[in-house]
Image (cartoon, grey):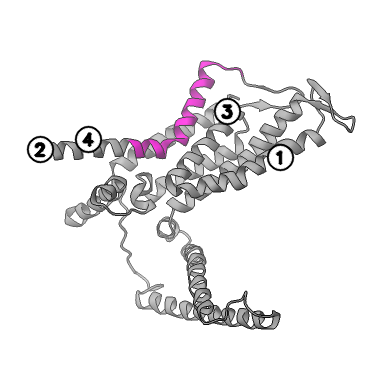
């Protein structure tokens, strides 16, 4: 591949071990530098999230849903830190609790009678399990897992990766989506800057009477509208100067499909096919009415659930493996020196 390929490999190597390089050299590292899985090929990242999000939406087995939620939360905490914990505590847990409590009050099906509600309706074990599983784990927990997986997807799959994957297939749509996803955080940052500047000169939207606050809000809106138009013109000029839309235009990319990507791809394809076959034979079957019952626990079902657990934990496994590997190499180098 030559010097260019060696440079790309070096960049990917540094990105893969950035979680350790940053503490060693006393710097701060971003998500892309700290997470080894983020340095994999964009196709690997997209395939992984497509698998885990798809399985989380279609597997209603309580064990599968619990595994998906736990793995997604663990990976989200690794990527985003305490923000994920606050979001889970403030949003996810209340949502799951409300769903679990509301379902038995309206759904009275089931064969195992526990007691009677003050309204005279029966409270059954199956309705509680359905509230905790089908509405809590398959509706609330499944929703929580999917939302958490999408937060991880947003952190890992940047707009550059998305354009790299789909730019040649659907170039116009990829460009529009990439620009839209990039515009939102830029707009929020600029709006914060403008709001703070307006506040410094006494034109905050929270100061003064109704008319004054309305004038201040219109001024801020006018500034943001002007900035948006200017940003669009600058983007168009930049795209034109770089030859966007010209025939035969080439594009530089730092993404290379190396041996690690091939290994992860083989692992994901193997596990995906294995889990699909397990679904076809009913290994993940589960019902809640009239009684809670699922597929019997056999060596095959246990193996399938362990494989599903390994698939959900793949990014964390990669991170731990790469971190230990780098620490060993760094320790050997330090011992030699």
SS of the residue at dot 3? helix
**Relative to residue 252, is residue 1 drawn left or right?**
left
249 is within the stretch colored magenta? no
Mark closest to the chain's N terminus, 3 or 2: 3
The secondary element bearing badge 2 is classed as helix
- Eye-nearest disc, 3 or 2: 2
Q: Position of residue 255 (x, y in %)?
A: 32, 53
Residue annotated with mark 1: 99
Secondary-structure class at tag 1 = helix
Front residue (pair 125, 111): 125
Residue 125 placement, left or right of 93: right
- CA–CA distance in space, label 4 to label 1: 47 Å
Q: Which residues are magenta?
A: 296-320
Q: CA distance from mark 1 to mark 3?
A: 18 Å
Q: Can you identify the residue that label 4 sits on?
A: 328
Q: Which residue is mark 2?
A: 336
Return the disc, 3 or 4, that comes first in the chain's sequence.
3
Which sits earlier in the primary sequence, circle 1 or circle 2? 1
């Amino acid at each position: 591949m030559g010097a260019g390929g060696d440079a790309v490999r070096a960049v990917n190597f540094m990105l893969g071990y950035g979680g350790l390089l940053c503490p060693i050299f006393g710097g701060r590292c971003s998500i892309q530098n700290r997470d080894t899985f983020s340095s994999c090929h964009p196709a690997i990242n997209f395939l992984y999230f497509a698998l885990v999000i798809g399985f989380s939406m279609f597997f209603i087995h309580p064990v599968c849903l619990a595994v998906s939620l736990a793995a997604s939360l663990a990976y989200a905490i690794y990527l985003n830190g305490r923000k994920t914990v606050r979001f889970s505590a403030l949003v996810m847990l209340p949502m799951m609790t409300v769903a679990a409590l509301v379902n038995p009050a309206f759904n009275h099906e089931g064969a195992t009678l526990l007691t009677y509600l003050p309204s005279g309706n029966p409270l059954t074990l199956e309705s509680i399990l359905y509230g905790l599983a089908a509405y809590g784990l398959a509706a609330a927990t499944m929703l929580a897992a999917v939302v958490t997986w999408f937060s991880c997807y947003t952190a890992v799959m940047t707009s550059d990766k998305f354009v790299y994957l789909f730019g040649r297939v659907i170039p116009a749509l990829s460009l529009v989506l990439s620009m839209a996803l990039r515009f939102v955080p830029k707009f929020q940052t600029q709006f914060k800057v403008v709001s703070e500047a307006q506040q410094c000169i006494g034109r905050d939207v929270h100061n003064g009477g109704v008319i004054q606050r309305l004038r201040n809000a219109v001024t801020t809106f006018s500034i943001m509208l002007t900035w948006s138009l200017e940003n669009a013109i600058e983007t168009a000029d930049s795209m034109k100067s770089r030859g966007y839309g010209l025939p035969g235009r080439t594009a530089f990319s730092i993404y290379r499909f190396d041996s690690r990507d091939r290994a992860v791809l083989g692992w994901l394809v193997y596990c995906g096919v294995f889990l699909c076959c397990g679904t076809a034979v009913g290994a993940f079957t589960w019902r809640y009415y009239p009684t809670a019952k699922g597929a019997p626990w056999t060596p095959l079902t246990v193996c399938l659930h362990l494989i599903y657990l390994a698939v959900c934990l793949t990014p964390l496994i990669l991170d731990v493996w790469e971190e230990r590997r780098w620490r060993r190499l760094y320790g050997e180098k330090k011992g030699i020196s």
